[in-house]
Image (cartoon, rainbow, N blue to C red):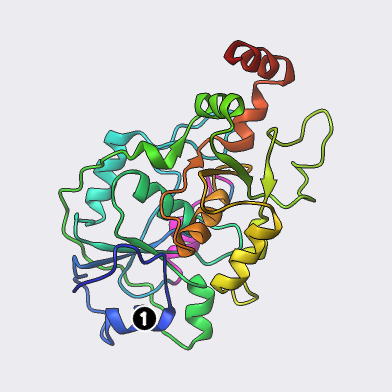
Amino acid sequence: MTVSRALTNVSTKWLRQHIGTSPGKQASRNIRILDTSFVLDRHADSYNDLYKKEHIPHSVHFNIYKCTPEKPGITLGWPDLDCFTDYVQSLGIWPDTHVIAYDRTGPISAAYRTWWQFRTLGHKNISVLDGGLKKWVADGFEVTSEEPEVERSDFVPNFDKSLYRSFEDMLENLKTNKEQLVDSRPLDHHSVIKDDNCGVIAGSKHVGFPYLFKEDGTMKSEAELKAMFDKAGIDLDKPLLVTCLRGLTACSVAGACHILGKENVPVYQGSWQEFSMIGPDEYKRKVDQKS
């Protein structure tokens, strides 16, 4: 099966065609569907509470928290690469496997985070199911509680730094302004409203992630997406990076950029949760050191 490596989203009808009418037990290595459904409580049992109850045929459970360190104040960290490699191999994801990520909730979901994380670790052949499980069910397609059998792969990550931004990268960009800073939090988000504990990184422009999607959870048209970036004063022909609160919703904005033809948009992994933890005095000191 030949698939486009630049495909950002696939439709429910596309996926239905590619998995066929008979689920079976043995899943093909050509395509791997990841049920990334999660809740913000990292200790919740998303496998039994969500995946085991019902999922798209042929899909395997993917825990977005797997292999990530637990740190106070940080919802989602970057995974340990040895652990992540073993985990992905156990899911049967080969170098030529087309990965399809979906979630069952929105607009905050792990599907685009999974999309960005796999791309950053070298697996560019990944798409998001447009509208997720909700759209799949609304379109009349079947769900199952049966788990597929997969063959362990030889997946090896290949870190792509061009898609990843760290705290130190953010400090450097505050000095150089080389990359436009796009914040995916809406302006009225509780963490954006400025008080002693909240705010934004200097120079941020906002493209609110909830407004990327239609009522059915699918991504808006290219024209509508482009209009959002234009209204925010963001030039897609120039470098940019995306941030948010937890390093989740920024990935959906990166996905929208990918749809619009801007393929390599980096995300600040730690986002506001990490950035704000240093405190205003420490932040000013570090910026002064960079000057």
Residue pictured at 42% horizontal, 50% vertical = 116
Instruction: Report the residue marked by disc 1.
Output: 14
Q: Position of residue 157 (x, y in %)?
A: 25, 42
Q: Position of residue 107 (x, y in %)?
A: 61, 62
Residue pictured at 54% horizontal, 29% vertical = 71
For residue 200, say whether it is visible. yes
Task: Count residues near mark 1 (Cα–Cα under 10 Å), then give few for <14, some for 14-19, many for 20+.
Answer: few
Residue pictured at 38% horizontal, 72% vertical = 145
Q: Is residue 58 left or right of residue 11?
A: left
Q: Position of residue 272 (x, y in %)?
A: 64, 36
In the image, residue 131 above or below residue 261? below
Number of marks present in the image shown? 1
Quarter holding residue 10: bottom left
In the image, residue 244 above or below residue 27? above
- What range is drawn magenta here? 41-54
Quarter holding residue 143: bottom left
In the image, residue 105 above or below residue 122? below
* Rendered-image quadrant of the C terminus: top right
Q: Is residue 43 magenta?
A: yes
Q: Position of residue 108 (x, y in %)?
A: 60, 57
Quarter holding residue 218: bottom right
| SS label for mark 1 | helix
* Rendered-image quadrant of the N terminus: bottom left
Front-most of residues 139 and 251? 251
Q: Amino acid at mark 1?
A: Trp
Q: Is residue 26 left or right of residue 171?
A: left
For residue 220, say whether it is visible. no
Q: Is residue 200 left or right of residue 181?
A: right
Q: Is residue 186 magenta?
A: no
In the image, residue 3 above or below residue 257? below
